[in-house]
Amino acid sequence: MIKNRDNFLFFIPILITLILIILTSLLMYQLKQFGQTYNQETEKELQTDIKQVLHIVEPLLKYNKYIELQNYCNEFNNEKIRITIIDNKGKVLADSNTPTNKLDNHSNRPEIISALDGKSNTIIRYSSTMQSEMIYKSTPIIINGNKYVIRISISSHNISKTLDKAEKNIYLTFFIGFGGVLLLTLYILIRVRLPFNKLQQSAIKIASGNLDTEIFVPKNGVLWELSRAINVMSKQLKRQIKSMKKLENFRSEFIANVSHEIKTPLTSILSAVEMLESLEPTNKTEVKCLKIISEQSNRLNTLIQDILSLADLEKRQIFKNRDFAELTISSTVENAISLCRGIVESSNIKIEILEKSDIQIFGNSYLLEQAINNLVINAVKYSQTDKITAKSYVENNEIKISVKDYGIGIEKEECSRIFERFYRIDKARSRELGGTGLGLAIVKNIAKLHNGRIDVISSIGKGSEFIICIPII
Ligand SMILES: Nc1ncnc2c1ncn2[C@@H]1O[C@H](COP(=O)(O)OP(=O)(O)OP(=O)(O)O)[C@@H](O)[C@H]1O
Ligand SMILES: [Mg+2]
């Protein structure tokens, strides 16, 4: 994710750099093309000039009129082009630009070498005489059996200077543009990416519940408003959670207080009923009434016990690990089973421990035993099974405690609801059996207290398996 976002942020500088490279290459190509075309055109012009010069020079050479030859060349003295006539030894016979006695032997000039070889040619090179870059066109002629070379040249200095300047300007523009891109990247990094990173880290901390996290607020820039909004949001959230916690605490405390208040008179009622029962009443109505009072007060007593258990578990969630100690999971399972073995076997149900894990965990053995006990009693009361099996094992870095029956099973839609408080599948039957619908909610809370969860796998007619899963730290 983060990588993708980074790519996106740096996409614009990369794109600008690419466009700059493409534009520079295109301009350089055009410049080279222009230079080439210019040279070709100049060459053509020189070719035409050479033909005209030949027309005049040929008869003068034929009759060895060297003075007239020099005079003719002198006519071009102030022209852009330079005309040079050279004999087969490289000696300059006439030149439009410099007196011949000041010119050295030209037999070593590349355009002369190849012309004396019989080939017309064009060469661009620096001329030490003219002290400038020149385009030379030279052509051989044979007069009276003697070889001569007519050379016409023109300075290419201005155009090459212009082209050089244009090339430098293109490179300069590229480097300025590239510098701009670097500055833009730096800006994105310092003003956007780094503050964004910090802001993201704070937001992640807030999302994971750490509402006291100090939000990083950049002094200005694009992220200023966003970080301020997150700050306001986190403060509001903190306030809301605080008031919700307050309300929740008040609710739990109220329920616990009411339950405690009911418990005292209920205990008196129960002992009074016990006393009356010990008197062994004979009157049928008296016996019936006493039975109803006894049954209902016992139900009320279980309900109050369950409500108090849940309230206690809720309190413990806040101070996790309270009363936690090292415990061996197999012993916890064994203790829980032996506690309810009597009730199970009196219902003609067999109970068996199939697998034991000797792993030790940090937990509350009393509460875990209560959870296993709830699951076993449920299997006895509702599943119509003739066998219950229990297991403890390690799987996927979790300790698992399973209680399985082979009875009626639970519908899929019901499976997710049975852990809700007061939820019972068959209300009438559950009530008849003294169920309050709080047992599985208690099991769920006990698992949660151990940072775990409770799973149920059930199939109609085959039975249900409840599994408490606790992560191994
Ligand atoms: N092993 C089981 N097989 C079939 N149904 C079950 C099984 N265990 C639980 N149930 C159903 O789930 C409901 C909820 O169980 P839970 O233990 O939460 O409440 P309860 O047993 O009715 O009351 P309490 O446990 O508080 O006495 C039960 O009423 C019952 O309908
Ligand atoms: Mg139960």
Image: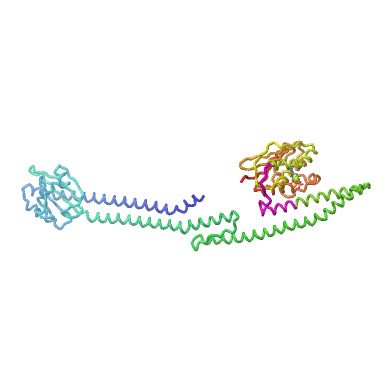
- Quarter of image, res 210: bottom right
The location of residue 146, given as percent across then percent down, is 8, 43
Quick one: 450 or 284, which is closer to the camera? 450
The location of residue 175, given as percent across then percent down, is 35, 56
In magenta, the rendered stretch is 308-329
The location of residue 278, given as percent across then percent down, is 89, 48
User: Residue at coordinates 38% horizontally, 55% vertically from top-left?
Assistant: 178
- Quarter of image, res 469: top right
Quick one: 10 or 72, which is closer to the camera? 10
* Side of 458 where 152 appears, left or right: left
**In this view, which residue lies farthest toward the front?**
326
Look at the image and say whether residue 325 sits in the magenta stretch: yes
* Side of 133 where 59 appears, left or right: left
Quick one: 257 or 114, which is closer to the camera? 257
Quick one: 444 or 458, which is closer to the camera? 444
- Quarter of image, res 360: top right
The location of residue 231, given as percent across then percent down, is 57, 61
Look at the image and say whether residue 141 sits in the magenta stretch: no
**In this view, which residue lies farthest toward the bottom?**
219
Residue 48 visible in the displayed image? yes
* Side of 330 where 221 appears, left or right: left
**In this view, which residue lies farthest toward the right?**
283
